Amino acid sequence: MAHVVVENLSKIYERGKVRALWNVNFSVEKGEFLVLIGLSGSGKSTLLRCINRLVEPTSGRVFLNGLELTRLSPRAMRRVRRRIGMIFQQFNLVKRATVLQNVLAGRLGYTSTLPSLLGWFPKRDIQRAKECLERVGLLDKMYVRADQLSGGQQQRVGIARALMQEPELLLADEPVSALDPATSHSVMQYIEQINKEDGVTVIASLHFLSLARRYGQRILALRAGEVVFDGPPEAIDDRKFKEIYGEEAEEVEIR
């Protein structure tokens, strides 16, 4: 069985009036880098959050390594989330905490509640946090408050926090939409490195097709909550682009 399998997944909001996802089916192999594309509101973020059940699907099934996530109790799902890293569009850092404290938050699912609330972490976790920060080039910032960093640096802290979980699956929800083009590539290259060097499966939603083509091994396109394309980046020609983004859309390159 593939590493991630999504079967007939649907999510309907507001008493059946808003169809965020409809009958979505796909699978992702171990170590694959899948990019989700589509207009704002097409269902990309909802799909990512349904995979780790931050949003509960209305119907359908999600499997990770053959384990059906959609059948797990909330407590069991919290344990599984230890293995699923998440990178957020708006970074989701504790602004007043230091960079090191934010990265250590990636171990909260593994440590008992009281010591973690008091900021007591094992030495091995502190050492690992430093190693994760070194990987994203921020070891020298570990005692700086998160709100003192640039946007790109904050997102790199988010990547280091996800690395602390030692994830087998990494979900990235528009990780560079708030960043300038040069910083976007810098952040995406760290995510690509985790995929290639650590063998971590990545599912990332991206706003620009040029970024999707550069980093995705495969692209899944959503329109109005439905899959309208699933294939290699080079298969998206002008006709397919219009089908995904609409007749009035024009492709914008990010360099």
Image (spheres, rainbow, N blue to C red):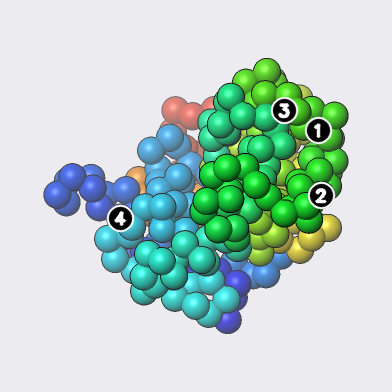
Q: Which residue is mark 3?
A: 153
Q: Position of residue 109 (x, y in %)?
A: 56, 57
- Give the distance between the C-alpha atoms of the residues marked 2 and 3, in whole angstroms: 20 Å
Residue at left 85%, top 29%? 140
Q: Earlier in the sequence, mark 3 or mark 1?
A: 1
Front position in the image: 254 or 185: 185
Foreground mark, 4 or 1, reads 1
Residue 157 x %, y %:
69, 36
Report crowding for label 4: few under 14, some 14 to 19, many 20 or more residues within 10 A (C-alpha). many
Q: Which mark is residue 24?
A: none
The tag earlier along the polypeptide, 1 or 2, is 2
CA separation in Å, label 4 and label 1? 38 Å
Q: Residues within 10 Å of mark 1 (few under 14, many from 20)?
A: some
| Gap between marks 1 and 2 measured at Cα | 14 Å
> Which circle, 1 or 2, is nearer the viewer?
2
Q: Which residue is labeled 1 in the image?
A: 138
Whether 163 is drawn above or below 92: the answer is: below
The answer to whether mark 3 and mark 1 are in CB contact below 8 A is: yes
Mark nearest the camera among 3 and 1 is 1
**Would you say the residues marked 4 and 3 are in contact, meaning their CB atoms lie under 8 Å apart?**
no
